[in-house]
Image (cartoon, rainbow, N blue to C red):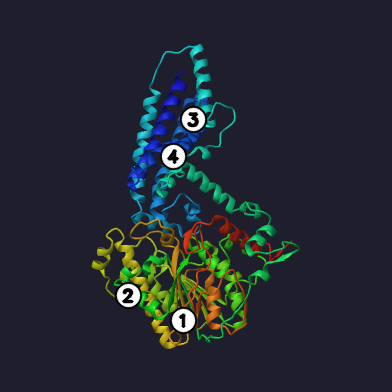
Amino acid sequence: MQIALRALLLFMYFLILSFVFKLVFLYKNDVLFVNDSLISILSSMRFDIQIYAYCFSVFYIFALINKYLANAFYYVLSFVCLAINLAFFVYFNIYHQNFGVELFLFKNEEIFALIKSGLKSNYGVVSSIILFFILMIVNIYILNSVNKIKIKTSVLKNILSFIFYAFFMMFCINQQFSFKADFIQRRIIASENEIVNISVFGHFIGFINAIEQIRKQTNIDWDSFKLDSPKKVACEFFNINPCTGKIDLKKYLHKVKQDDEYFKAQKIYYIISESLSDWVMQDRFNDIFTDIHTLAKEGAYISALHNAPATKQSLEVQILNTYNTTDDTAAKYAKIKKHFFSLNDNLKNLHLSSAFFMGGHDNWGNIANLTRLSNFNANFYAPQIRAVFKDDSINSEWGVFDDVLFKYVALKDYDFNVIMSTTNHPTYNLEFQKRKLFSLPFEKAEKLSKKYKNELLTIYWYQKVLVDFIKEQSNKYPDALFVITGDHYGRYNIDDSLDLKITHTVPIIMYSKNHKIYPICKITKHIDIGASIINLIAPKNYEYYSFGIPCFSLKEQDVKSYEQIGFNASFKNDKFINDELRQKQAQALSWYLIFKGNIIE
C-alpha cells in the first residue's frame, strides 16, 4: 500500500509540474489570459496524464521489485521531464514554433560552435541550465520526502491498493473506462491563439512527435507523405486529364523562355544570405539598412516564400531546384537518379563554368556531397579561404566573416558563382567589429528595438559588406547579374509577430548595373530563382526544367498574382495561407523525381 501511495503522489507531482511549465510558458508569452487559453491547456493535460501514467506504472513495478531500481527510474524520468520542458522554452525562443526536426540541428552544425552560440545567445540557454539543476535538486528532495511516508498496512490493503492503482493507471492511460485507449487528440480543445496551441501540442508530446519526424526522415519512402499513388498525385498537381498511361515528369517540368529580351551576363553572383528575412525590406528600416534598400530600388525586389526552414534544406532546394523533400538529400547523394532539373543542369547549354563558395566548412551537413552531385566545377570553403588570408581577425564562430568570403570570391574567375554567407547568425555578439571596417549605428538600432539591437546591427554590417562587394564587382563587370536572397526566415522579427507573411518570407533582389530589371510576380519563391535567372540571361526559346516560374524580366509588364507554394505557407488568391496538401504533393513529387526518376508508371 505504501508503494501505491508513493507512486500516486509522485504521479500527481509530475502532473502539477507539467501544468506549471505550461502556465509559465503562456505567461512569458503574454497569452495566459486570452479567452480560451486555460481551457485549452487543461484539456492538453490529457497528453501528460497518459505519458506519466505509463511512466509511473513502470515506476510502481520497479518499486515492487527493488526500491533502488525505482529511484533510479525516477531520476531518469526527472532528467527527461525537465530537459524536455526547458528545451521547449529555448526552442520556442529560437524558432517560434513547436518542436520539429530543427531540434536535432547538432547533426549538421559544428558542435562546438553550436554550443558556444547557445551559451552566448539571448535564447535562455544559460538560465534554463541553471533552472534544470535547481529543479533536479527539488525533485530529489520530493522523492526522499515521499519515501519517508510510513502507513500501517496489511495483505488485504496491499491487494486492494494494487487493484486500485492498476485500474487508476489504466484509466489515465486509456482516458476512458475501457481496456482500449481513446484517441486523445480528438478530445483536445484547440485554442484560437497560435502560441497557446504551440503549448497545447508541445512540451512532452511535441518532443515525442519531433522524434517521430526525425525517425521518418531517415526512412522516407512514398508512403511517408500519406498521399494517393504517385500517379494520382502527379495528375492532380499538374492537372493531367485523363490520368492514364505512364507519366513523364520531365514533360510537365519542361519550360521554354518566352521573352525576347536578354543580356549576356559577364558573371552571375547568386548570393544566399544567412537568415536574411523579408521584413528587413520594410520602409521603416530604410534609414538603417540603406544600402540594401537602395540596391533593391536600383534593381528589382519581390517578397518571396522560403521553401525550407533551415540552411541545409534551403541549399538542397535552391541548388537542386526542387521542393524540400524532408529527406536528407545531401547525405544520400549516391542514391540520386541522374537528374536534369538542378541549377547547373538548366544552365549547362549556356556553357557557364560554376563554383560554390561558403564561409563555413565542407564537412557541414554533407554540403560537399550536394555540390559535387550538382556538377559545380569547383567548391571553396573556410579552409581554402584561410589559406589565402592568413589573419586571425577573419575567423568567426561559423567559419570566416562574410567580407573575407566576398574578397575570396572576387579573386576567382567563374561564370556562375553560388555564395552562401554565414555571419548573420546567432550569437549576434558583434564579433565582426574586430574587422574594423566601419562604425555601427548603435543609437538607430536601439531606437528600433532594444531586445534585438545586436541582431539589427549584425544585419546592418552584413548588408553593407554585401552591397560594397556588389558595387565593386559591378564596376569590374557592368554586365554581371546579382541575385540576393535569404536561405530562410531569420526566426525572429522585432515585433515578435507570428504573421505567416512575416515568418515565412525572404527577399529576392536581382540587380545588374547596365540593365534595368523588372518584377513581374506579386510574390515569388526560392524555386522561381532559377527560372528567373534564365529569363534574364538566356535567348528566346531556351529550354529548361523547373517547378518554378520566371518572376523577373527585362521587359516591363503587369505584375501578376500567381499561386505560390512555400514551406508551411502558400500564397493563393492574394492571401498567405497554409495549404498543407499542395505542399505535400510538391514535396512528394520532388522526392520521387530525385530518388526514383521522372517516369511514373
Q: Give the mark nearest the N terminus, 3 or 4.
A: 3
**Viewer-side label of 1, 3:** 1
Q: Secondary structure at mark 1?
A: loop
Q: Give the mark nearest the N terminus, 4 or 2.
A: 4
Q: Give the mark nearest the N terminus, 1 or 2.
A: 2
x, y percent for residue 269: 48, 78
Mark drawn on residue 56: 3
The reply to whether discs 1 and 3 touch (Cβ–Cβ < 8 Å) is no
Mark drawn on residue 18: none
Identify the residue shown where x is 54% and y is 83%. Answer: 537
On the image, numbered disc 2 is attached to which residue?
Answer: 290
Q: Secondary structure at mark 2?
A: helix
Identify the residue shown where x is 43% and y is 88%. Answer: 476
On the image, numbered disc 1 is attached to which residue?
Answer: 517
Q: Is residue 253 left or right of residue 94?
A: right
Dot 4 alpha-carbon crowd within 10 angstroms: few under 14, some 14 to 19, many 20 or more: many
On the image, numbered disc 4 is attached to which residue?
Answer: 81
